[in-house]
């Protein structure tokens, strides 16, 4: 008899979400985590003596409220604000604009720079509001069955409902959505806005984690997906979510083992997943296995050669997961201001042209000298993350190639850190002299630390062909061609980021099959 009903591989936010939902439904669940700490990319860590991050990523605006409610995470200390965080868009000429949750308040900010941009922003947010019901219905539920050879009546009903939602937008809004979805984000925003750094700042979420520049086709859909999904924020960042999830998992009876690296998914004689073998040889049996690691890690590294069907191996190998993100953590011995103000979240970019130029070298495995940055200064709201009066500056550096042809050495990472500091100096003069410590993580380092295939922060690129049938058609509904094996990580629908959505929907699929 199996010792566990389900073994969950990976103790990140999705793995813990899956495990906790299953345990609350009466399943006996074990989570095995490779690292000594829980959290995966959401784990807060000390990177310099006395200085702590709140996770690799910054944005918690996509965390699903229904997961927080069903797991009662607020009872475990989670504090959720029912609006997304303010973000400051920075211009090299010293100007800045704060993008607030309230469109009218943001328009008031923009009006100081451009009346046209103020009115355009209100219209843009009104369009996002109108389409959000359709977009969120698609992204908050398991993907529809689009296999025309195996459509059931239930699948047809789901597809019909989604079609009715689209039609319910009205002809004008529906046609606008169908028009703009394939557009590059540069053309989309150039039609609406006037000010360069405003366009660049608004465009940024469309490009984060993407092998794309602002003139890449279909990048607008990524921006709209982010706008529609961004509804709230977790106080304390990703680490606060992990803390609450760990408490909820423990209370529900989930057994958690850290420092337990899975070497192989064990199959029975019929080829069904029946447990795992840890590095060191220990085997643990279970009726089912749920993998929150990347699809490529799951299928290409956790099975023996020729154990899987060739067709599955072939399509998994084709998943595009070209990492383009680095991380620089700074320990700073003073309070940090950007363009003369205390800022918790900020974006650089300055213009769509500069962002495109930053992407160009990536195609040739080279590194730009002027990356665009997603900046988080968590000590603004949580001073305890650094010594008194000091700051932590967490920087996601975009358009940095995983496969840098110069190789990621100590010297090349030092150069990347210096380029980031040079960019930050534009907005915070004298910052470099106040840096007490710096950690630079290249995309290759992200792969090593977090087992992110090719350093991709979302487990695979967010482009239209890798969204609805994510990661591949045969695994698009959390089940896989390997009986008893499920996917519950960011490589599954609806994709990456700190959301808990793939973990929640995978748990539902596992319970449905029980």
Image (cartoon, rainbow, N blue to C red):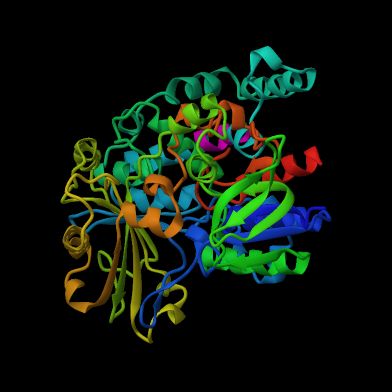
User: Any magenta on residue 128?
Assistant: yes
- The quadrant holding residue 24 is bottom right
Asked if 357 appears above or below 417 in the picture, the reply is: above
* 15 horizontally vs 452: left or right: right
Asked if 342 appears above or below 413 in the picture, the reply is: below
On the image, the x and y values in percent for residue 221 come to: 45, 32
* 382 horizontally vs 112: left or right: right
User: Any magenta on residue 235?
Assistant: no
* 366 horizontally vs 477: left or right: left
- The quadrant holding residue 152 is top right
Q: Residue at 33% x, 47% y: name it.
A: 201
Q: Looking at this view, is 504 or 339 the one in front?
A: 504
User: Would you say residue 123 is visible in this rendering?
Assistant: no
Q: Main secondary structure of the magenta part?
A: helix
User: Would you say residue 395 is visible in this rendering?
Assistant: yes
On the image, the x and y values in percent for residue 472 come to: 54, 29
Q: Looking at this view, is 104 or 443 the one in front?
A: 443
Q: Which quadrant is the C terminus positioned in?
A: top right
On the image, the x and y values in percent for residue 146 come to: 63, 20
Q: Looking at this view, is 161 or 245 the one in front?
A: 245
Give the magenta range. 127-133
* 37 horizontally vs 51: left or right: right
């Amino acid at each position: 008899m199996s010792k566990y009903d389900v073994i969950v591989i990976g103790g990140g936010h999705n793995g813990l979400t899956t495990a906790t939902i299953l345990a609350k439904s009466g399943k006996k669940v074990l989570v095995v985590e490779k690292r000594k700490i829980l959290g995966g990319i959401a784990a807060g860590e000390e990177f310099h003596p006395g200085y702590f991050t709140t996770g690799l990523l910054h944005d918690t605006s996509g965390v699903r409220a229904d997961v927080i409610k069903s797991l009662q995470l607020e009872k475990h200390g989670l504090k959720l604000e029912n609006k997304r965080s303010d973000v400051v868009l920075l211009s090299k000429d010293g100007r800045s604009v704060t993008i607030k949750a309230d469109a009218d308040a943001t328009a008031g900010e923009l009006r100081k720079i451009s009346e046209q941009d103020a009115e355009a922003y209100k219209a843009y947010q009104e369009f996002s509001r109108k389409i959000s019901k359709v977009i969120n219905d698609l992204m908050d539920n398991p993907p529809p069955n689009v296999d025309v050879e195996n459509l059931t009546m239930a699948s047809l009903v789901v597809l019909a409902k989604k079609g009715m939602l689209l039609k319910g937008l009205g002809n004008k809004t529906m046609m606008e959505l169908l028009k703009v979805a394939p557009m590059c984000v540069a053309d989309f925003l150039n039609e609406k806005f006037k000010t360069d750094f405003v366009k660049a700042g608004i465009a940024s979420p469309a490009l984060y984690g993407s092998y794309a520049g602002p003139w890449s086709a279909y990048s607008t859909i990524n921006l709209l997906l982010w706008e529609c999904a961004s509804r709230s924020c977790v106080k304390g960042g990703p680490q606060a979510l992990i803390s609450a999830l760990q408490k909820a998992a423990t209370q529900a009876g989930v057994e958690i083992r850290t420092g337990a690296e899975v070497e192989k998914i064990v199959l029975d004689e019929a080829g069904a997943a029946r447990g795992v073998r840890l590095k060191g040889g220990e085997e643990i049996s279970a009726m089912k296995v749920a993998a929150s690691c990347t699809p490529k890690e799951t299928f290409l590294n956790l099975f023996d050669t020729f154990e899987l069907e060739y067709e599955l191996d072939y399509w998994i190998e084709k998943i595009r997961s070209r990492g383009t993100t680095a991380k620089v953590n700074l320990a700073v011995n003073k309070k940090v201001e950007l363009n003369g103000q205390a800022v918790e979240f900020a974006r650089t970019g300055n213009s769509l042209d500069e962002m495109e130029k930053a992407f160009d070298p990536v195609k040739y495995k080279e590194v730009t000298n002027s990356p665009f940055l997603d900046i988080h200064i968590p000590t603004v709201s949580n001073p305890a993350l650094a010594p008194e009066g000091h700051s932590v500056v967490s920087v996601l550096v975009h358009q940095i190639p995983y496969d840098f042809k110069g190789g990621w050495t100590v010297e090349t990472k030092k150069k990347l850190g210096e380029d980031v500091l040079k960019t930050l100096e534009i907005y915070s003069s004298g910052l470099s002299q106040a840096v007490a410590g710096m950690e630079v993580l290249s995309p290759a380092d992200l792969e090593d630390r977090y087992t992110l295939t090719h350093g991709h922060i979302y487990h695979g690129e967010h482009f239209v062909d890798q969204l609805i049938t994510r990661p591949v058609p045969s695994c698009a509904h959390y089940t896989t061609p390997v009986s008893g094996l499920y996917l519950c990580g960011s490589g599954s629908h609806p994709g990456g980021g700190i959301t808990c959505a793939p973990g929640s929907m995978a748990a539902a699929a596992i319970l449905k099959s029980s």
